[in-house]
Image: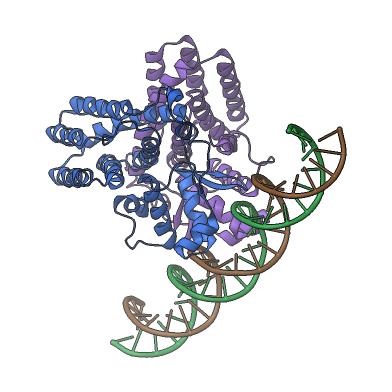
Chain colours: A purple, B blue, C green, D brown
DNA sequence: TTTTTGCTGTCTGTGTACAATGTTCGACAC
DNA sequence: GTGTCGAACATTGTACACAGACAGCAAAAA
């Protein structure tokens, strides 16, 4: 259906793309996912225009797209900032993801082919390499990419498009709330999930996916028990940097 | 979260709204849902600008939003047209809706309060009045509104936002493929669903919702057996009117 | 008659100027 | 020292102008 959307997230942004606003969109998107842009950061149209060498018109369109995916928040007359989901919102996003991932997993089992599985296996290997090399940002992006490719395999464009928005927001949440230094999305679980999908065991695949999401969520500090923390951490979601 | 989005669809568009592009967006949106704009209709920026008395900038933003919700298709350098989902896409949309509506129904049961139920009962009554008076367009819109308000009751903004897109597209599909002269979304089923949600019987509520969707889909001609129909109907998804 | 090529008109893509709105900071009163 | 008001500044909202792309038509050649 919407062809441009498919490729935007799939590969590292720097490369050539269709139109200018695609490039800008992809760059900002990646920057957010790789946590080079912290939640709350102000995204001024003029600054971005200078950085990318384009007019505000292009920036505006890119921000509009990001806004629709809830990755940035557009405040009328007050500009755009990188979204910083609250704990409540984070939980709702995880709930929505469980709903969607369950359906996607079942559909993926139905539409699974050896070629598609192979592509995904390679993707997981790339992810593993990134984490091994300490490139956490790229790892997080590829990890999200894995879930998107699964959605592609499910062969349902509406669900894919929703999943794209959810994955972006999840990355944002991880950036904001991840506690331990561990990687957030274990590739071992990705591999095991692929094997199960390949075997055609729908129920087990769904179970694995649900546990996978449990593990991701478990690594986050979503309990709101930050009362004893330092002020800086407590109010990090309020302060707009840059 | 995004407050403006909530109210955009909720009430008849003609009234005052926040910003200008909200007004334009709502007008076009309603026109599509009420089938005053047929699938395939070209939406020229300049024409719309004259009609609404605003510049192309505003129109462009409205079309961009509609495009993101897949209600109109934006073709680079070739303008926007009202989307005309294929049979395949229609089935995928219904599949996605089953997934989402199931979750929404369960959450709605959990968060149900007498006040909210009452609001919805009134909405169904309005819907009934519209169909009784022969205002099919408004009826379809209110019927979609019912499902959106249910999503609101579910208290999960991400799911709500996705549901909004799905409901819009469903309306488009109904406009394109509905066969019989019967109203497409029986308010009786809406009422029964509300009663069951009120009673707290989650499983039965989900069953009702699934059957409700079955009934809607059953009224459509999604079998691809339109060979005997007239040419106009067969090729309606190809021809760009106006 | 059919196909191809070039022209022309219409529409969208982009940049920029101006208007409107929000924010910040200083002065002044309490 | 604190709070409030106001003006200058900065940023976004909107309109418009120009440039570029596509589509349709016409004319010429096969």
* Residue B211 visible in image: yes
Q: Position of residue A55 (x, y in %)?
A: 64, 59
- Residue at x 42%, y 41% (from the top left corner): A177
Q: Quadrant of residue B169?
A: top left
> How many callouts does the rendering have?
0
Q: Position of residue B199 (x, y in %)?
A: 12, 32
Q: Nearer the viewer, residue B139 or D12?
A: B139
- Residue at x 45%, y 11% (from the top left corner): A200
Q: Is residue B167 above or below residue A240?
A: above
Q: Is residue A183 above or below residue B138?
A: above
Judged left or right of residue D21, residue B208 is left
Q: Position of residue B76 (x, y in %)?
A: 61, 45
Q: Nearer the viewer, residue A120 or A221?
A: A120
Q: Position of residue B101 (x, y in %)?
A: 30, 32
Q: Is residue B186 above or below residue B130?
A: above
Q: Is residue A110 above or below residue A128?
A: above
Q: Nearer the viewer, residue A185 or B91?
A: B91
Furthest toward the top, the residue is: A199
Judged left or right of residue B130, residue A219 is right
Q: Nearer the viewer, residue C5 or B119?
A: C5
- Residue at x 63%, y 40% (from the top left corner): A13
* Residue A71 visible in image: no
């Amino acid at each position: 259906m919407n062809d441009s959307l498919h490729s935007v997230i799939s590969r590292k942004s720097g490369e050539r793309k269709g139109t200018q606003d695609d490039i800008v969109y992809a760059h900002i998107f990646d920057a957010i996912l790789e946590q080079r842009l912290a939640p709350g950061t102000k995204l001024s149209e003029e600054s971005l225009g200078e950085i990318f060498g384009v007019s505000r018109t292009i920036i505006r369109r890119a921000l509009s797209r990001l806004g629709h995916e809830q990755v940035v928040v557009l405040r009328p007359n007050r500009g755009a900032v990188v979204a910083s989901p609250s704990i409540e919102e984070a939980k709702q996003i995880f709930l929505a993801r469980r709903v969607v991932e369950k359906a996607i997993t079942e559909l993926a089992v139905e539409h699974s082919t050896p070629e598609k599985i192979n592509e995904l296996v390679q993707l997981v290997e790339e992810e593993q390499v990134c984490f091994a090399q300490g490139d956490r940002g790229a790892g997080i992006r590829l990890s999200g990419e894995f879930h998107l490719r699964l959605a592609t395999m499910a062969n349902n464009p509406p669900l894919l498009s929703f999943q794209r928005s959810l994955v972006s927001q999840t990355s944002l949440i991880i950036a904001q709330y991840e506690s331990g230094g561990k990687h957030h999305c274990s590739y071992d679980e990705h591999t095991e999930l692929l094997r199960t999908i390949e075997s055609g065991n729908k129920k087990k695949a769904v179970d694995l996916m649900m546990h996978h999401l449990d593990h991701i969520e478990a690594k986050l500090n979503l309990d709101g028990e930050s009362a004893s923390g330092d002020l800086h951490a407590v109010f990090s979601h309020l302060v707009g940097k840059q």
